[in-house]
Image (cartoon, helix red, strand yellow):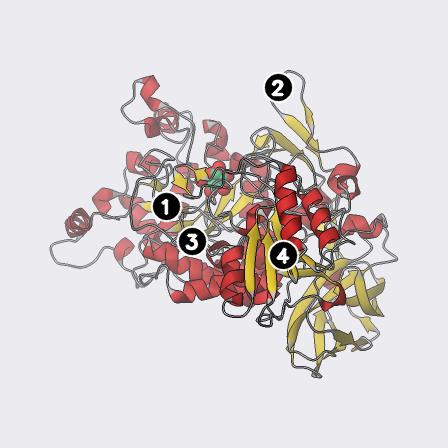
Amino acid sequence: MKNLASFALAIAATLPAFGNMPAYRDTSKPVEERVEDALARMTLQEKINIIHAQSKFCAPGVPRLGIPELWTTDGPHGIRPEVLWDEWDQAGWTNDSCVAFPALTCLAATWNPDMAALYGTSIGEEARYRGKDVLLGPGVNIYRTPLNGRNFEYMGEDPLLASRMVVPYVKNLQALGVAACVKHYALNNNEVNRHTTNAVVDDRTLYEIYLPAFKAAVQEGGAWSIMGAYNYYKDQHACHNQYLLNDILKGEWGFDGAVISDWGGTHDTRQAITNGLDLEFGSWTNGLSNGASNAYDNYYMAAPYLDLIRKGEVGTKELDDKVRRVLRLTFRTAMDYSKGSGAICSEEHYDAARRIGAEGIVLLRNEGSVLPIRPASGTRILVVGENAVKMMTVGGGSSSLKVQREISPLDGIRNSAAGVASVDYARGYVGDVSGEYNGVTTGQNLADSRTPAELIAEAVEKARNADYVVFVGGLNKSAGQDCEDSDRASLGLPYGQDAVIEALAAANPRTIVVNVSGNAVAMPWVKKVPAIVQAWFLGSEAGNSIADVLFGRANPSGKLPFTFPVALADNGAHALGAYPGTRREGSDIVDLEYSEGILVGYRWHDTKKIKPLFAFGHGLSYTTFGYGKAGVSASSMGADGTITVSVPVTNTGDIAGAEVVQLYISDPECSVERPTKELKDFKKVYLQPGESRTVEFTVRPSDLAYFDAAAHEWVAEPGRFVASIGSASDDIRTSVKFNLK
Ligand code: GLC
């Protein structure tokens, strides 16, 4: 919390005796005028100070001018607990618990931009209440490999879905005076070798797959800051990268915000000066060993930069641009006095977490409509699995949180069955019994000395006498699972879970598998269990969101934001052997060829005709939806025209539900290779039983274009196109042809 007394004094010192406020402090003045006024008043040292951190998570303002510090905070799913000034470890505050919102894979799985707006508002209020100016999120790196430890923080494999979902999050967050810091720009698609990977990506793939979500966040969302990634691109670190930052972000996209380094992502003063970095955080410089009193003076953009200026080796043009961007960020956040004071741990935030969680849960399989569970008196439910009880809000890396509460899946199921059904529990397997991250501990003691055989025997014995068995397993937030700074080693479930599931399925035909993960997993038992639910890392309300779906209070409407391959080799990033890359002779750089190019995710599976375990866009409901014949407003579209593609959708079941109607476009006559089809729009429609609605999509030439790298522009070639509409990428219900003149 800022020291209000000194703050007030600092302000008083800057107000001229006659009280007329200097422009930079006058919130009625345009931000640009305030920026120029402040810049003109700052000394060279003050300009250098403001472009790098002064602590683990804050940058200095200009005390003399009453320009406040800029406070950043992790993470994309909730507001990180306070750490010591210059440490990762906890500061030991007692008022910094928060609400953990569902991981962003879950948000993406709602396919509902309204949920993204709710998310941005809710997390923004928590950030504002905690006095934070920049939220270090959301993350929108594309899901390229199912092994990437941080996929749970991102929004899936498709650039259109991620683009549509990131924009409302950014807009609503920033409406509260909290800047988004969209990350990690760009090409940070795996965690192994994250500091040394040099992503080798052709321009067409870069522009069609890996940039769109960042571009949408900037141009449609108006993001006020962007976080540079750790990896290299074209042999330059992404945190100071001529191509990504100057040419594309600030040049082509007109980004007027600040580029913030990832923590430790800055490596070179001269590159940082010229290649677009504006605010340096987390550099690994131990100034104390250099005898300096303040390690932060040794940051690449601190004394070394000042030194170059004083020697006349570099000018101050770049410095002024950096300072303008940091001042703009400050005026939009810390010095926007209209921004209100937010709220934390409110019932509204818990309700938002629960709703987003329930709406993002994906019903993958439901043979014989085993779900929803309709408990009658005497119904016996057995819950099995470590993930039914293990806290998931601690761990996973920088998105780890200290929550005020976390409802476990077992808690949620017990709460829902209370008074009607009995609920028993069996561990089933032992996975990761630890539970600590940077000093935040779960306080759970999950230790269990029994052998796998004993654990399975207990679970099977209980399963024989149950009416329902709910196995809650999947991954967790420990290293080598869904966690920053490491990737998984394989696609399969860890800790022998497959054997547990097989044994339970053999013991009880109504075995329901709830997979808690941020990544696809192999499911060799997929045909042996009648029901499978993909539950994400759902945060504080996890158990309630899961129970809402299992017991039918929420009719599942989530759709997969990424493909579940049957085997790792079926995935484009692994089929060609490119992952995790090749170390360069005599260097620590690992060149990682994105050799599948634009064929990421379902684009690969469709084009190579590889049947997935569960497809991108797949998700069942407790009701059913019928699609009529697609229609088109005209048989052809001019280069500057549009056409409307429409389809009647009916709820053909007996309960209300929501369907995500997906529009894919194919370009069968193109002069260049294109994926079989690409998602170009979607709409989520809520229908009562028997209700029909005609869903309309407006198709523009830009929806038909591919990126012509040679011409460096988007091109829509005249000719025949096909609009395919369906309930999943592998469940196209109707198609219609049209021409582009
Ligand atoms: C981490 C992460 C980044 C996070 C930052 C601060 O290494 O890569 O996402 O916001 O450092 O914790």
Residue bearing mark 2: 587
Structural distance between the alpha carbons of marks 1 and 2: 37 Å
Q: Nearer the viewer, mark 4 or mark 2?
A: 4
Type of amino acid under label 4: Val
N-term mark: 1 or 4:
1
Q: Which residue is mark 4?
A: 470
Q: Position of residue 592 (x, y in %)?
A: 68, 32
Residue under pointer 1: 81
**Earlier-in-chain disc, 1 versus 3:** 1
Q: Does label 1 point to a residue whose CB lies under 8 Å from ligand 1?
A: no
- Residue at the extreme left: 17
- Which residue sits at x=30%, y=44%? 61
Mark pair 4, 3: CA separation: 41 Å
Is residue 689 visible to us here?
Answer: yes
**Residue 411: where, in percent of width, then height?**
49, 58
Q: Nearer the viewer, mark 1 or mark 2?
A: 1
Q: Mark 1 or mark 2, which has the lower sequence index?
A: 1
**Location of the C terminus (image quadrant):** bottom right
Quarter of the image for residue 184 reads: top right
Amino acid carrying mark 2 in the image: Ser
Q: Amino acid at mark 1?
A: Pro
| Crowd class of label 1 (few under 14; some 14 to 19; many from 20; radius 10 Å) | many
Give yes or no for contact between labels 4 and 3 (Cβ–Cβ under 8 Å): no
Q: Position of residue 386 (x, y in %)?
A: 56, 46
Eye-nearest disc, 4 or 3: 4
